[in-house]
Amino acid sequence: MPDDTPRARDDQATPSFERRIVAPADLAQAAARLPHPRVFTNGVFDLLHRGHVTYLAQARALGASLIVAVNDDASVRRLGKGSDRPVNRCEDRMAVLAALASVDLVTWFSDDTPLALILAACPEVLVKGGDWPVDRIVGAEAVRGWGGQVHSIAFQHERSTTETLARIRGAG
């Protein structure tokens, strides 16, 4: 495992919310223990803001449990969000997400898409933010194939990590 790859932690000194972080290889088994219907979403979640937490609460409301897959640092850099992104390392982004009441499991992915994790978790509900048309959501065909639903949740609070960083840097 490369040095910058996040690791799930199980030691006694770890806060209990961090036990919600699972390695990709353990996702299928951990997801199987969650109440149904399971909701799956993914994203960068670099600087967590009101838009993120509202979206996650809305996603969770579509089912009985919520799984969040986070782009690892290398995959964030490939998204072209800027040479200085992510601001927060993957393990830190996952810990913050795991501490949210709406989130039941957090994992990470290195690929350009979370398709392998979607197939492993077998969610009944797949969700992305309103900037994703349903027909472009990765994994939609698979989830619908096993009888699940796919949703694109409209943004309620127009927030953006990129815009926040611009304001911090004095460019906005």
Image (spheres, rainbow, N blue to C red):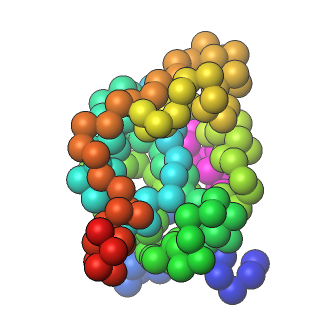
In what quadrant of the picture does the N terminus appear? Answer: bottom right
Q: Is residue 159 above or below residue 60?
A: below
Q: Locate residue 118: give its quadrant.
A: top right
Q: Is residue 30 above or below residue 2?
A: above
Determine whether, in the image, residue 153 is placed left or right of residue 44.
left
- Taking the magenta stretch, the answer to whether it contains residue 23 is yes
Residues 76 and 149: in front is: 76
Query: Which residue does the image show at 61% across and 13% down from the upper left?
Result: 147
Residues 19 and 164: in front is: 164
Magenta span covers which residues? 22-33
Query: Which residue does the image show at 56% across and 71% down from the upper left?
Result: 82
Q: Is residue 112 above or below residue 140?
A: below
Determine whether, in the image, residue 138 is placed left or right of residue 82.
right
Determine whether, in the image, residue 37 is placed left or right of residue 103.
right
Q: Which percent across, then down, holds residue 114? A: 66, 47
Q: Which percent across, then down, holds residue 126? A: 53, 30
| Count of marks overlaid on the render | 0
Query: Which residue does the image show at 69% across and 16% down from the upper left?
Result: 145
